[in-house]
Amino acid sequence: METDDLSAPLGQAKKTKSRKLPFAAPQVVAGLLGLCGLVAVGWAALVNDPLGGEPVAVVATGFAPVAGAKDMPKGDGVEHSRHDGIAMKAPPEKAAAAPPGSQTITIIDGSSGKSKDVIIPGKSGALENEAPAGKSSDNAQGKFSAMPAANPATKLASLAALDHKLLENSRHGPIPKVGTNGARALTIYAHARAIPAAQKELPRIAIVIGALGISASGTADAFSMLPAPVTFALAPYSTDVEKLAEHARAENHEVLLQAPMEPFDYPDNDPGPQTLLTSLTGEQNVDRLHWLMSRFQGYVGIESFMGARFTASEQALTPVLGEIAKRGLIFVDGGGSTRSVAAQVAGGHNLPFAKTDIVLDAVPTPIEIDRALARLEISARENGVAVGYANAQPAPVERIAAWAKKVEARGFVLVPITMVALKTKSS
């Protein structure tokens, strides 16, 4: 019999037996960790979760009808491929009723993608820009961005005014060729001006306004303010580029096609879709050139856009300039690099050639543009010819227009680009 607490002697504590757990605490922790691992492996093996537990949001894909969608211009049903997918077109803002003899041209802003309808009247009318008061930003210095599909009806109407003997079909569409009688686009679409005998020995200056069709306001200003001897270089990505080219020719401006070429910092600085690249083969670059050539017709030649690395590579440039010569065109080096070998390669192909001597809007302020024009005059006096380039932006267009009114009184002749290119080749 066990002694109870009452009968136990005073001062002696009762001894109790301690009970031990069947396992230690570290073993418990290890077991829990193992169990967690088994659960994780089982979840990965049995549960279909391709996002790996990332947060997921579910959004309805039904879009409400776009207001005015029925008024949006229709494409040809085939969107052209580009580096960042299919270009999305916003409904163009409506312009006021066009006066007789004018043309309405849709221009997509290069930075915002916003569309504007610009009314370009005939020579007797004043050019209007009927876009709403909210002026969108213009961006001719940056990348070309808008890339709409061409409207077949518009293209056929534009081609109706062209010499079909100078066109041949490619897989991308019509591109220039030399006619069977030897006729070439560089002469058929040239607008050479008559120069009096007393002025034939004066220095010649050609001005090229590029990226036309990217900036709505700059394009409108160029058509309304600049004289006919100024050459217009059209971006191949702008909407209604056929109409722009047609109207430029009607106003006696010579037209160039700007071809995007690889700069040194490509692809961080991307000239646009179908850029000619040094990493491609000659055949691939010629195919891209044909794509660019098919965007519109009636141009006298090709001008490089950016292209510092491409024009410095003889291997990349040779097949491209050979194809341009074969098509009866001129080539204008946009002046993207002092290392350009375009002059040597063009000479090897007997290709009429010109090079930009001064970029007039490198610093696009009125004072710096005026200084660049003064340097252009100095270059013309020293070399007999000089070529200046500026983008179709309001500031350079305004300063060039003011300069053009007085330049011939100072002993120069303002000429279109073919008169400089042909003179350079013959000399």
Image: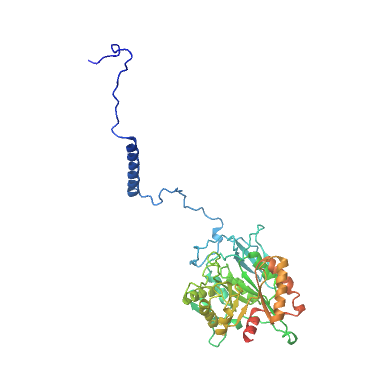
Q: In this view, does 35 lie to the left or right of 98?
A: left
Residue 111 in sight in this render: yes
Q: How many marks?
A: 0
The x and y percentages for residue 341 are: 57, 78
Residue depicted at x 34% and y 44%? 37
In which quadrant is the C terminus drawn?
bottom right
In which quarter of the view is residue 425 placed?
Answer: bottom right
Q: Quadrant of the N terminus?
A: top left
Colour scheme of the picture: rainbow
Please provide percent x and percent y for residue 297.
57, 76
Q: Is any part of residue 126 visible from this angle?
A: no
Of 157 and 325, the residue lying toward us: 325
Answer with left or right where residue 46 lies relative to residue 381: left
| Residue 389 position in % (x across, y down) | 65, 73
Determine whether, in the image, residue 279 is placed left or right of residue 216.
left
Question: Which of the pair 71/396 is nearer the observer?
Answer: 396
Residue sticking out furthest to the left:
1
Of 408 and 191, nearer the camera is 408
In this rendering, is residue 310 above or below 22?
Answer: below
Q: Where is residue 73 in the image (x, y as percent from the top left)?
A: 55, 64
Work out which residue is located at the far front of the displayed protein and give it: 11
Residue 12: name its quadrant.
Answer: top left
Q: Residue at x 47, y 52 (%)?
A: 62
Give the residue furthest to the right.
Answer: 409
